[in-house]
């Protein structure tokens, strides 16, 4: 049949005893959107890779069963045979952007150039793709200078513009603000109406509810295949995503209080792009602060100043009353722990426990203390069973927990998290929320960038809303999410958290 057809698919990766997928079957017909959800490690991303024809042709794995793409055997087909028939967008744009193009428009054109599409046809495809994802204003920007969410929209546009018969999307809303997530949810049925067969792997209910039917995976098997509203409310879905108990505060030792003050902070990137416009903020010891705003509002630029990764164009950042302008990042790291949005920017060791031990060893702590800190960090993040695993054998959401554990093991009095719940299932979000709660209970400060309004409202005592490099709201969750602020929040691409 035309479209995607998977029959009795089983996948096992080298060095792993269990199967990532075990007897999975599904079909996605033209003009159909099918969703896949499930907890971390359930096999969702492996299914996406197989559906795109990347297993075992690109990624080594033992594969049995069949994957048919427009009637072609994807397991044995050549790359040339599949080109133009199937496209995949990954959850992390860093895995997709070429890093060789100087503008967003050139990046989106890259795939079309490789297929020798005529220039006039390129323009006719690129403009609608950018409009669909709301990135027309970024056309002449350098892709590598964009925020994570903006890069994700560019990566999506670069795949959509190819016009493949089959479209595979792995966590397309992972780095998007709420407005962007709703935009993607509205876009998928429109693309399907044009004839595409779409398989979307996602945790966000907004995306899943736009599908025709949804599969729930658990342990590499399909445990439910039903209409999305039934799948999301089912006992099977609940059983694969039961909330994890928050980490007890006793797991985290108390810390000396640290205060942080930002005064008149401005930052301008090359090309006169003003990312911050006179931001002033004070963070009290033991405070939990969520920084929210639409993609490109300056959130990541702001927090990268807090540990010296970026230096102000003007203004100051003061730690315990002292300007950090002349201090090394490695020196500040003992007090300000930073967990990047993309874990692959942070981890590099061949074993999880070695990765987690790297920070405390660099602090020249006694071996016994290093061992204790590593054990505690692994326990807090639920990684104890993965201590000897190579981090790059883990999926991206678990690698994000590895990066978090590496910073927790240093016990910094101030913790900065950039999109900590990105790609996490419900247990993962609950676990990270428990860590935030425990850190605060021990007198430590937590600052987090997040697009998850439920997470922000549940675990943070203060929310700062940014728009175009400025602060437009600052207050408690009850204040920020009052109905009186709905219009202002909408102008920043945000929405009040919806009841579960």
Image: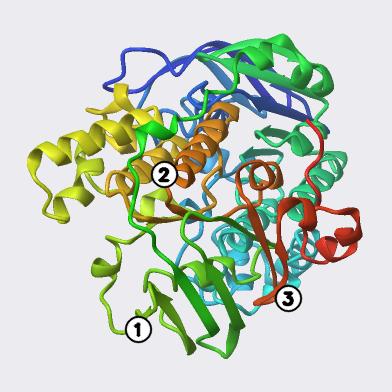
Q: Earlier in the sequence, mark 1 or mark 2?
A: 1
Q: Residue at x 29, y 62 (%)?
A: 333
Within 10 angstroms of label 2, few (less than 14), some, or many (20 or more) residues?
Answer: some
Taking depth in this image into account, of 196 and 429 the one nearest to the observer is 429
Label 1 element class:
loop
Q: Which residue is drawn at 59% across and 23% down?
A: 243
Residue 66 image-quadrant placement: top right
In the figure, 21 relative to 374: above or below?
Answer: above
Q: Residue at x 46, y 59 (%)?
A: 285
Taking depth in this image into account, of 392 and 323 the one nearest to the observer is 323
* Quadrant assignment for the C terminus: top right
Label 2 element class:
loop
Q: State the residue lying farthest toward the left.
A: 367
Residue beneath disc 3 = 137
* Quadrant assignment for the N terminus: top right
> Which x, y percent locates residue 321?
39, 78
The mark lying in front, picked from 1 and 2, is: 2
What colouring method underlies this structural image? rainbow
Q: Earlier in the sequence, mark 1 or mark 3?
A: 3
Residue beneath disc 2 = 442
Residue 143 seen: no
> Which x, y percent locates residue 341?
48, 54
Label 3 element class:
helix
Residue beneath disc 1 = 325
> Which x, y percent locates residue 461?
63, 51
> Which x, y percent locates residue 470?
67, 77
Q: Earlier in the sequence, mark 3 or mark 2?
A: 3
Q: Is residue 481 left or right of residue 394?
A: right
Within 10 angstroms of label 3, few (less than 14), some, or many (20 or more) residues?
Answer: few
């Amino acid at each position: 049949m035309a479209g995607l057809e998977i029959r009795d698919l089983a996948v096992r990766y080298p060095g792993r005893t269990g199967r990532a997928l075990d007897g999975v079957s599904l079909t996605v017909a033209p003009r159909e959107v099918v969703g896949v959800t499930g907890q971390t490690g359930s096999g969702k991303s492996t299914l996406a890779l197989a559906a795109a024809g990347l297993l075992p042709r690109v990624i080594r794995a033992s594969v049995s069963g069949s994957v048919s793409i427009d009637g072609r055997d994807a397991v044995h087909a050549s790359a040339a045979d599949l080109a133009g028939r199937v496209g995949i967008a990954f959850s992390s744009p860093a895995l997709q952007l070429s890093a060789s193009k100087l503008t967003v428009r050139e990046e989106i054109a890259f795939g079309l150039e490789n297929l020798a599409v005529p220039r006039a046809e390129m323009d006719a495809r690129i403009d609608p793709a950018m409009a669909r994802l709301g990135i027309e204003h970024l056309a002449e920007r350098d892709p590598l200078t964009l925020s994570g969410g903006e890069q994700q929209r560019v990566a999506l546009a670069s795949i959509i513009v190819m016009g493949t018969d089959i479209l595979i999307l792995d966590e397309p809303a992972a780095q998007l603000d709420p407005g962007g997530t709703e935009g993607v949810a509205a876009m998928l049925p429109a693309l399907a109406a044009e004839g595409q067969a779409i398989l979307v792997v996602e945790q966000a209910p907004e995306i899943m509810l736009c599908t025709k039917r949804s599969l729930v995976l658990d342990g590499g098997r399909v445990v439910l295949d039903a209409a999305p509203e039934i799948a999301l409310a089912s006992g099977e879905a609940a059983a694969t995503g039961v909330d994890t108990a928050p980490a007890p505060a006793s797991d985290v030792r108390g810390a000396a209080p640290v205060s942080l003050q930002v005064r008149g902070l401005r930052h301008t990137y090359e090309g006169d792009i003003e990312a911050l416009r006179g931001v002033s903020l004070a963070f009290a010891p033991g405070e939990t602060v969520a920084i929210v705003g639409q993609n490109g509002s300056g959130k990541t630029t702001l927090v990268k100043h807090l540990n010296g990764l970026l230096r102000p164009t003007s203004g100051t950042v003061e730690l315990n009353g002292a300007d950090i302008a002349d201090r090394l990042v490695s020196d500040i790291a003992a007090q300000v722990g930073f967990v990047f949005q993309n874990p692959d920017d942070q981890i590099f060791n061949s074993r999880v426990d070695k990765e987690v031990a790297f920070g405390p060893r660099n602090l020249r702590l006694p071996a016994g203390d290093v061992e204790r800190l590593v054990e505690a960090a692994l326990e807090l993040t639920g990684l104890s069973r993965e201590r000897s695993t190579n981090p790059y054998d883990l999926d991206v959401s678990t690698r994000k927990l590895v990066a978090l554990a590496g910073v927790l093991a240093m016990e910094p009095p101030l913790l900065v998290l950039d999109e900590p719940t990105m790609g996490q299932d419900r247990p993962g979000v609950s676990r990270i929320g428990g860590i935030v709660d425990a850190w605060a209970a021990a007198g430590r400060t937590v600052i987090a960038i997040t697009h998850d309004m439920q997470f922000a409202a549940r675990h943070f005592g203060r929310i700062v809303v940014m728009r175009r490099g400025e602060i437009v709201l600052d207050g408690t969750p009850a204040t920020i999410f009052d109905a009186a602020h709905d219009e202002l929040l909408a102008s920043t691409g945000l929405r009040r958290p919806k009841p579960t």
